Image: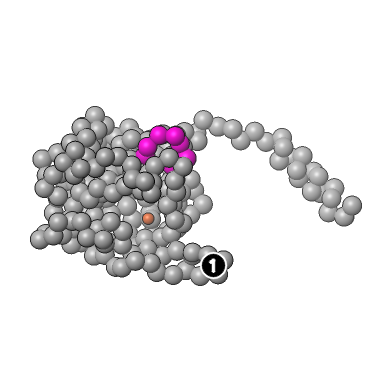
C-alpha cells in the first residue's frame, strides 16, 4: 500500500458521508452567466403562439437529428431560411488536440430586424418588442431539442436570452462550470453564451425554447 493510501481512505470516507441529493436539480439555480431577468411572459400565450407558428411554418415537432429550428426574425428582403439563419459562427475544441477553432460563417445579428410574416400577429411579436426594449435583438428563433440530445460544447459571439416554452427537469443549460434547469414558467433567462456552454435534453419529453440573440 502506498503512503498516500491512509489520506485517500480518509478523503473517500468523508466524501461518502456527503449527501448531495437535492430537489434543486429540478429548479433554476442562478450562477455566473445564467441569470433570470426581471421580465415575465404569459406561458399560455407562448404555447398558443408556438402552436400557431408551428402550423404556419409547417413545423411538425422534433427533427430526426434532434435539433429543430423555426426562425422568428429575418433580414429585410430575405425569407429567413438561409443556412446562416439556422446556425452561424461559433468556436469549439473539437477533438483530442484541444485546439479552439472557428466553425461556420459570421452572422451580423443586427441585420435581423424584421419579424417573419407568420410571427407578426402572434404573441411572439410582443415578446420581441419587450425584449427589444431591454437590448437590441438579432436572430430570434424557436429551438427544439429531442430527448437524449446535446449541443456541442462551444462558445458564440453573443449572449442569448432563453424563454422556455416546453421543458422537463432533464433539460439543462450549462455555462462554463455551472449547470441548471430553466423552468418554463414565463421567465426569461440571460445566458452568457460568449462563454463555453451547451444545452442538453436528458429527459424523455421535448424541450422547446424561444431563443433571442443579443446583438452586441
Ligand atoms: Fe450556442
Image coordinates for residue 105, horizontal then vertical, percent: 31, 68
Magenta range is 201-207
Q: State the image quarter where residue 106 is shown.
A: bottom left
**Magenta-drawn stretch, dominant element (helix, strand or loop):** loop
Residue at the image position 48 percent from the left and 45 percent from the top = 179
**Residue closer to the observer: 57 or 87:** 57
In the drawing, does residue 13 fall left or right of residue 54? right
Q: Considering depth in this image, is 78 or 45 the residue closer to the camera? A: 78
Q: Position of residue 119 (x, y in %)?
A: 15, 44
Q: Residue at x 51, y 52 (%)?
A: 177
Residue positioned most to the right: 1
Quarter holding ligand 1: bottom left
- In this view, the residue in front, 53 or 8, is 53
Q: Is 142 in front, or is 67?
A: 67
> Residue 120, position in %: x, y?
11, 44
Density class for disc 1 (Cα within 10 Å; few <14, some 14-19, many ≥20) is few
The answer to whether residue 148 of the structure is visible from this angle is yes
Q: Position of residue 64 (x, y in %)?
A: 36, 46
Q: Quadrant of the C terminus?
A: bottom left
Q: Is residue 203 magenta?
A: yes
For the image, the number of numbered tags is 1
Question: Relative to 81, is 124 above or below?
Answer: above
Q: Inspect the magenta stretch and tell me whether residue 72 lies in it.
A: no
Residue matched to label 1:
98
**Residue ID at (18%, 52%):** 73
Secondary structure type for disc 1: loop
| Picture residue at 46% right of the left edge, 56% below the top | 153
Amino acid at each position: 500500500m502506498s503512503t498516500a493510501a491512509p489520506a485517500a481512505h480518509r478523503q473517500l470516507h468523508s466524501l461518502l458521508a456527503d449527501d448531495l441529493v437535492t430537489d434543486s436539480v429540478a429548479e433554476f439555480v442562478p450562477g455566473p452567466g445564467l441569470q433570470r431577468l426581471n421580465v415575465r411572459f404569459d406561458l399560455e400565450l407562448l404555447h398558443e403562439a408556438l402552436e400557431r407558428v408551428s402550423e404556419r411554418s409547417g413545423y411538425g415537432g422534433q427533427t430526426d437529428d434532434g435539433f429543430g429550428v423555426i426562425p422568428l426574425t429575418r433580414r429585410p428582403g430575405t425569407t429567413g431560411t438561409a443556412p446562416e439563419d439556422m446556425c452561424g459562427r461559433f468556436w469549439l475544441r473539437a477533438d483530442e488536440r484541444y485546439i479552439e477553432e472557428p466553425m461556420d460563417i459570421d452572422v451580423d445579428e443586427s441585420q435581423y430586424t424584421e419579424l417573419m410574416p407568420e410571427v407578426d400577429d402572434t404573441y411572439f411579436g410582443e415578446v420581441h418588442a419587450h425584449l427589444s426594449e431591454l437590448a437590441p435583438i438579432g436572430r430570434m428563433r424557436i429551438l427544439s431539442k429531442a430527448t437524449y440530445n446535446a449541443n456541442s460544447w462551444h462558445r458564440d459571439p453573443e449572449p442569448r436570452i432563453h424563454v422556455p416554452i416546453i421543458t422537463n427537469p432533464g433539460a439543462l443549460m450549462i455555462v462554463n462550470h455551472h449547470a441548471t434547469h430553466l423552468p418554463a414558467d414565463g421567465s426569461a433567462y440571460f445566458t452568457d453564451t460568449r462563454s463555453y456552454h451547451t444545452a442538453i435534453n436528458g429527459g424523455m419529453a421535448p424541450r422547446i425554447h424561444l431563443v433571442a440573440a443579443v446583438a452586441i
